[in-house]
Amino acid sequence: MIQPDSYTRSLLKRSPGETVTAHGWVKTRRDSKSVHFVQLNDGSSPVDLQVVLDAGVVPEDMVAKITTGACISVEGELVASPGKGQAVELKARALTLHGVADPEHYPLQKKKHTLETLREMGHLRTRSNTFGAVFRVRNALTVAIHKFFQDRGFLYVHTPVISSSDAEGAGSMFQVTTLDLEAVKPADFTQDFFGRRTYLTVSGQLEAEIFALAFANVYTFGPTFRAENSNTPRHLAEFYMIEPEMAFCDLKDNQDLAEAFLKSQIEQVLAACRPDLEFLNKWYEPELIRTLESLVSATFERMSYTEAIAQLQKSGKNFEFPTHWGADLQSEHERYLTEELVKRPVIVTDYPKEIKAFYMRANDDGKTVAAMDVLVPRIGEIIGGSQREERGDLLVERIRSHGMSEQPYWWYLDLRRFGGVAHAGFGMGFERMMMYLTGMKNIRDVVPFPRTPGSAEF
């Protein structure tokens, strides 16, 4: 088993004179008359470890096989490096070749590939510099999310992937069945595996509310699915959601937590992945680090939906989607508010009830609900949430007004009957946050195995 102190990120910080063993994949090899220089990386760091391989340490026919993509282990001594950008390099005493990579066929040779081309080789793109950076950031973001909630005493809840209810009321769901739908028409779902229609979940929120009304503060972090035929750079069919749910919490508390949550994630990732972010800043988004640092230091603007519409209407902008009260905000509207009007993140609250989900608490004006969207420069909406409707009679009205039956939600209504209390929560798409943190423009480039219309190969 590889020991933690043999990872590249650890070896690069160790002192000359130590004997170590390094493992990894070859990035490049260059040769001189009496020495070979091998750039080795095991994925733990954006910086390669340079291996100095003197002639004669291994047979020359083996050296010929140490090509880009080959997997090797090297035992030797760390020595001070005369080169820039590295304090030490590894002077090899012995080398083991674990696996070759035929240079005639290995796709990741010196030739630069577009991100689109790399998506077609999902089994190998993880070895590229770009995706090394992206997936180290993804790991650090995962740690940051759990740390934020765990430090605040939240209970981590695993909500089901298979559900019989549609939390969003949108109907874009993947059905789960064992029935032969061609042989049995019409299908009798009482004979199906679960005895009813079931789907891949679109949200863990409703189940999280069960736990919030027993443990007060909880959060989910798991896969969700949308069967929308949206083949865009911002949509996936399978993605991860973070959904905290808090009892004794109103819309203001919800906004405060969302702001603290975003700032904490960015602070932690900046600290953990600075070299990766600098790489992404250089090659993909020149304003990346400045934007992230600006968000951490910013005070989020807060305005109602009605105020936002008024600002958009007097902006003088010729938006592709016209603005009027009752219309949902589009990405172009969100970016105007954050990038041009206030030049910092904005939390928009109190949306028209007709454009929001059934579970959102009705405001006293009879027209709006206690909803919120957190908007950030460069990407627009990154968090959506609300105070939940805790009044059972009004919740039934909202369910019916959405053309839904309350019967599947009997247990959800029971939560209002038995010790209900004001509560609130929000959801953040993990991949949407990854796009913001990395500067990547296509959501397929921040998820290990993108699931999109017509694509599920890797």
Image: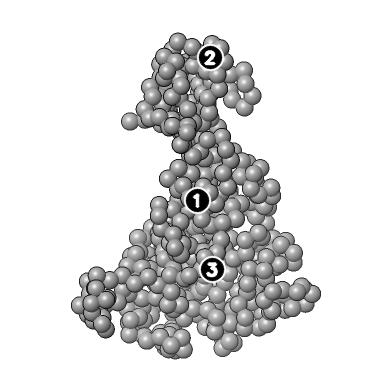
Is 3 left, or right, of 191 in this rendering? right
Residue under the point 77% across and 77% down = 314
Distance (Cα) linking label 1 and label 2: 36 Å
Q: Nearer the viewer, mark 2 or mark 3?
A: 2
- Pointer 2: residues within 10 angstroms few (<14), some, or many (20+)? some
Name the spot of residue 72 as percent of width and height, x first: 41, 26
The residue tagged with tag 3: helix, strand or loop? Answer: strand
Are dots 1 and 2 in contact, CB under 8 Å?
no
The residue tagged with tag 2: helix, strand or loop? Answer: strand
On residue 35, the disc is 2
**Mark 1 or mark 3, which has the lower sequence index?**
1
Amino acid under disc 2 = Val
Name the spot of residue 282 as percent of width and height, x first: 66, 42
**Mark 1 or mark 2, which has the lower sequence index?**
2
Name the spot of residue 99 as percent of width and height, x first: 38, 30
**Residue at which label 1 appears:** 119
Q: Is residue 194 in sight in this rendering? A: no
Amino acid under disc 3 = Gly
**Mark 2 or mark 3, which has the lower sequence index?**
2
Q: Is residue 227 in sight in this rendering? A: yes
Q: Residue furthest left?
A: 191
Amino acid under disc 1 = Arg
**Residue at which label 3 appears:** 384
Q: Residue furthest right?
A: 316
Is 111 left, or right, of 316 in this rendering? left
Residue under the point 58% across and 22% down = 87
Distance (Cα) linking label 1 and label 3: 29 Å
Residue under the point 47% across and 71% down = 228
Q: Quadrant of residue 7?
A: top left
Please state which of residues 62 and 132 is positioned toward the viewer in this rendering. Answer: 62
Please state which of residues 390 and 452 is positioned toward the viewer in this rendering. Answer: 452
